[in-house]
Image (spheres, grey):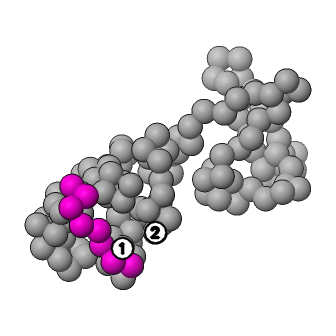
Amino acid sequence: MISENLLKFRKGKNMTQEALAEAVGVTRQTVAKWESGESIPDLDVSGRLAAALDISLDDLANAPADEMSPEPAMKGKHMFGMVTVGDKGQIVIPVRARRVFHINPGDQLMVLGDEGQGIALVDARLFMTFTEGMKNGF
């Protein structure tokens, strides 16, 4: 998994193997071996790789391919995969999405919708702060 993630995140940052190797302090051949799965980086080097790629160590080790955005222009944008709507309309927010957006049990989310755009979930406190600001003219 690290080999696939390393390759996708590196390409997503439009980095060459040489540039990544230089940022981490290894040779290009070492990066090539990691990406091919021939070897894996140790924990210290993995931390440097994650820092160079601006990702978490957990993402480097565990991010499923369908959760990665290879487009550098999409920084801050995420695709967390699909969810299934249950019989009563419930959905389960993927763990990675909950981590990225700091969603914890008991948090309230505002459900917003636009028939042309879709549904959005927004932190209820943020939404209320925004609406109060609008009401008070900021």
Q: Indicate the secondary structure of the residue bearing disc 2.
A: helix
Among the two numbered marks 1 and 2 on one chain, the one whose residue lies closer to the N terminus: 1
Q: Main secondary structure of the magenta part?
A: loop
Task: Please indicate, yes or no, whether residue 101 appears anywhere in the rendered image.
Answer: no
The answer to whether residue 84 shows anywhere in this view is yes
Q: Position of residue 40 (x, y in %)?
A: 29, 68
Read off the residue under disc 2. 57
What residue is at 12 percent from the left and 67 percent from the top? 28
Provide the residue span drawn in magenta: 36-43
Q: Are marks 1 and 2 in contact (CB under 8 Å)?
A: yes
Mark 1 — residue?
A: 46
- Label 1: element kind: helix
Rendered location of residue 126, percent (x, y) = 78, 53
The residue type indicated by label 1 comes to: Ser
Separation of disc 1 and disc 2 at Cα?
A: 7 Å
Label 1 CA crowd tier, 10 Å (few <14, some 14–19, many 20+): many
